[in-house]
Amino acid sequence: MARTYSGIRESRPYTYNDLGGKSLRLADDFNKKCLKNADRTFSQGLQCRQINSISCVLSLEDSVFIIHSPQGCSGCVTMGADGYRVGQAHRGVTLIKSPRVIVTNLDRDDVIMGGEKKLADAIKLARERYNPKMIFIFTSCASGIIGDDVDAITAEQQKLTDSILVPIHCDGFRSKICASGFDAAFIAIQKYLLPQEPQPKVKGLVNLFAPTSISYKDQLEVERMLGLLDAQVNYIPFYSSLEKIRRITSAEVSTSICKVFADEFMKELDETYGIPFAHTVMPIGVRNTDKWLLGIADLLGKRKLAEEYIEKEHRRILPQLEGIKKRLAGKKVFICGGTGRSFAAAALIDDFEMELVGLETPTYDFDAQMDIEYLNGIHQDYVVDIANMQPFEQVNLVNRLKPDLFIGVPSWSARLGVPTTHVLDPKRATMGYDGILYLGNKIADQVENPGFNRKLAPHSRLPYKESWYRQDAFKFIKED
Ligand code: SF4
């Protein structure tokens, strides 16, 4: 990379992972640069960055994926593989494939003696068995701690094969921010897969970066919206190919569907290849869809076209929202999700006149501040929990705030009897103007049908003492 970005998000200034408080106070402190770094003295699991690196490239055509780790690190791959298989079905693929994954299975002996031979053997197996175009190699905590020289092994093995070997340095322990895994994947994509020579620009070609969580319906909708601006879309890297990746540097502009996906890579493309980018919001809800489309339209010089389309869509959608508002207005909501989607959901619920009482999201930084400031203008002072996972804090807050609805992974709040749903739906349409209607009706259905969670609560115990619910949810966050 031309810049010196390490792929570790903590290295970006004013980035916080361990924080809790009321939204107005946090936004004010952030502006005054008064927020202090902190850590949790008790912590309940973090999402690892390795799975984000893997999921970023798992659906690339003609690839093999080697996870250089103990067996356990590959556990989450089943989730990505499921998404990949469903995604193929939605795209009309009849001969559905599973991703080709090899785990080196580092064990106790390897931790003492080194795991480099196992990695070399795995690469040999990958090329002999599959002879793919690309072989991705993911590092892990174990390979990082024992100091396996993955780059040297890869360079040595590269001499023996035409497959392109792509090591991705995504050892989990290096960052508490799982989005760092996306950055690690893009750093490797740039280093090993992008053409080194400047490519001729293609007028109207737009790089549209999309994470795995985007459904096929959403892909079609965002591509359709960009098509209205006469853009030709290069949708990458999800369900993509080496050829499409090599077209990245020919694009006129770039944008992303998610706020924390490819943002650093787009900066790199801007600085190295002169490809400007729109980095706005996730197109969920009226405000965000408008903003997302205008962001890219401005770069393409098509603002007027976008405004005409937005006006037409508002005339079509806004009257239909009235029925949903009648079902949802005034209901209190707690949202937990990744940075892009949680902020998008918090803006979306304003379309239905719902009230935000709590927001849990993994990172607070300059980008988050922009969203928090916007949300502070439309919602009352709400609780913000900056946490990657940490269900013990979540149950404490949900129990205290008593929302009418929880949006996010339901495992814990459902057992408190709170109606739950989510806006992260890799299988259905959630984006653009029609997505608003789908999500609105889905949310209203959940609020009006709380029976399952209500009946679940008395029969399902969360693993916390009653006394925990009376304590400060943020008591384990200690400033440095
Ligand atoms: S790489 Fe590290 S943090 Fe990630 S799953 Fe493996 S052991 Fe856990």
Image (cartoon, rainbow, N blue to C red):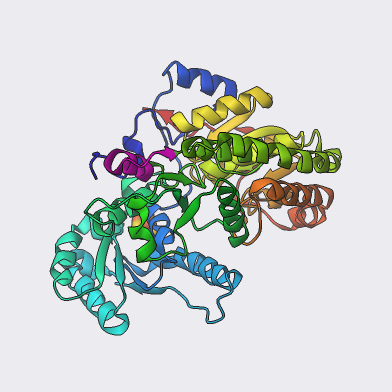
415 shown above or below 27? below
Q: Where is residue 358 in the image (x, y as percent from the top left)?
A: 64, 34
Is residue 397 among the parts visible in the rendering?
A: no
Q: Residue 162's quadrant in the figure? A: bottom left
Q: Is residue 222 left or right of residue 440?
A: left
Q: Where is residue 174 in the image (x, y as percent from the top left)?
A: 31, 47
Q: Residue 144's quadrant in the figure? A: bottom left
Q: Is residue 129 left or right of residue 430?
A: left
236 shown above or below 9? below
Q: Nearer the viewer, residue 309 or 58?
A: 309
Quadrant in which the C terminus appears: top left
Q: In this view, does 364 lie to the left or right of 443?
A: left
Q: In this view, does 408 lie to the left or right of 264?
A: right
Q: Where is residue 103 in the image (x, y as percent from the top left)?
A: 33, 72
Q: Give the extent of the magenta segment.
A: 264-277
Q: Which of 187 and 150 is in front in this view?
A: 187
